[in-house]
Amino acid sequence: MNKNTRDLGIFGEKIAAEYLRKLCYKVIRSNYRCRFGEIDLIVYKNNTYVFVEVKTRRNTSFGRPVEAINRNKKTHLLRVGQYYIQNLNLKDCNFRFDAIEVMIDPLKPPKVNHIENIM
């Protein structure tokens, strides 16, 4: 991953976190890493922990951003989420996995598309 791609991803994650805060989610962790991989955002609202994968693009030349979340990526997300849940011994809470697409156009405000329950 080159620096420009990483910078774009970081920018998209910040936009996604701000979007979720405006919807009254509490951002618990950003870029949570463990031996199974990484989750971009972990947020909480209404007794539900939400594990969020953020995909940021400048255009759709290679498809919609969410299309980059393939079966292999979903498996990693699930393992990281399960590890987080077990590691913190979280009980009596709900969990789900969401995706947020962020489309960046330098001439327009970023577009955010929140997709709940991607798994």
Image (cartoon, rainbow, N blue to C red):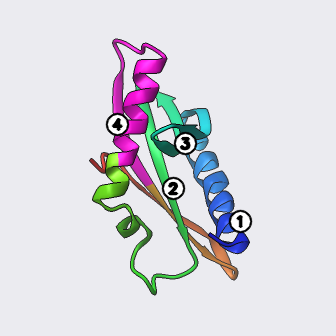
Check disc 1 and report the residue beneath it: 7
Are the residues at dot 1 and dot 4 in contact (C-beta closer than 8 Å)?
A: no
**Residue 91 visible from this viewpoint:** yes
Are the residues at dot 1 and dot 3 in contact (C-beta closer than 8 Å)?
A: no
Position in image of residue 113 (x %, y %): 45, 61
Q: Report the span colored magenta.
A: 76-99
Along the horizontal axis of the image, is 41 left or right of 18?
left
Q: Which mark is residue 96?
A: 4
Along the horizontal axis of the image, is 36 left or right of 3?
left
> Is residue 82 rendered magenta in the image?
yes
Between the C-alphas of marks 2 and 3, the distance is: 8 Å
Q: Which mark is residue 41?
A: 3
Mark 4 or 3, nearer chain start: 3
Q: Quadrant of residue 2?
A: bottom right
The quadrant in which the N terminus is found is bottom right
Q: Residue at x 46, y 87 (%)?
A: 61
Mark 1 or 3, nearer chain start: 1
Q: Residue at x 43, y 83 (%)?
A: 62
Front-most of 85 and 113?
A: 85
Q: Is residue 22 above or below residue 67?
A: above
Position in image of residue 18 (x %, y %): 64, 47
Crowding near pointer 1: few (<14 within 10 Å), some, many (20+)? Answer: few
